[in-house]
Image (cartoon, rainbow, N blue to C red):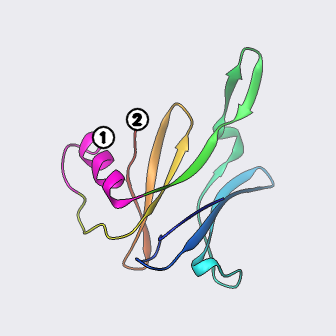
Amino acid sequence: MIHGQFAKQGQIDWAVLCSKDGVSMIMIFWNGSPSRVDSLAPAPDLDYLQEIEPGEIGYSRKISTIAPKGIRYIYATFGGGGRPPFALDHDGIDDYFMEKASVVHFRHGGKWIRLAGAD
């Protein structure tokens, strides 16, 4: 479970990586409310299995809060050296396959936008 300002500055939202029937997704609880919930990035759990120790397979999808400064750095480094196409004034969710790659989910204009993540 993570928290951050995923919709706008000053509003604390919570996000949880959940799995049901072999599919994981990120559930967002806007302003911490169980009655205002959004979900994004559904994916088969099998897509995130890898060897974590010799002979041991483990689930390796994680999420973390990423601040605007971190998003700008990742976008400049891994997104072709440019700037995001809009202002970054609140947090995003870094959704990553451990030791592989990530994508940043950023809420803009009422929709989730996928931005370049780290490789």
Q: What is the C-alpha distance between the residues marked 2 and 1? A: 7 Å
Amino acid at the residue labelled 2: Asp
Q: Is residue 50 left or right of residue 118?
A: right
As helix, strand or loop, the secondary structure at mark 1 comes to helix
Quarter that holds the N terminus: bottom right
State the image coordinates of residue 38 (x, y, percent, origin top left): 60, 74
Residues packed near mark 2 inside 10 Å, few (<14), some (14 to 19) or many (20 plus): few
What are the residue bounds of the magenta stretch?
67-83
Quarter that holds the C terminus: top left
- Determine the residue located farthest toward the left in the rendered image: 82
- Residue 10 placement: quadrant: bottom left
Magenta residue check for 75? yes
- Determine the residue located farthest toward the bottom in the rendered image: 35
As helix, strand or loop, the secondary structure at mark 2 comes to loop
State the image coordinates of residue 52 (x, y, percent, origin top left): 68, 25
Q: Is residue 96 left or right of residue 90?
A: right
- Residue 85 placement: quadrant: bottom left
- Residue 32's tag is none
Residue at horizontal 61%, vertical 46%? Answer: 62
Residue at horizontal 69%, vertical 53%? Answer: 24
State the image coordinates of residue 26 (x, y, percent, origin top left): 62, 61
- Residue 78's tag is 1
- Residue 13 placement: quadrant: bottom right
State the image coordinates of residue 31 (x, y, percent, origin top left): 58, 80
Q: Which residue is mark 2?
A: 119
Magenta stretch: dominant SS? helix
Q: Earlier in the sequence, mark 2 or mark 1?
A: 1
Amino acid at the residue labelled 1: Phe
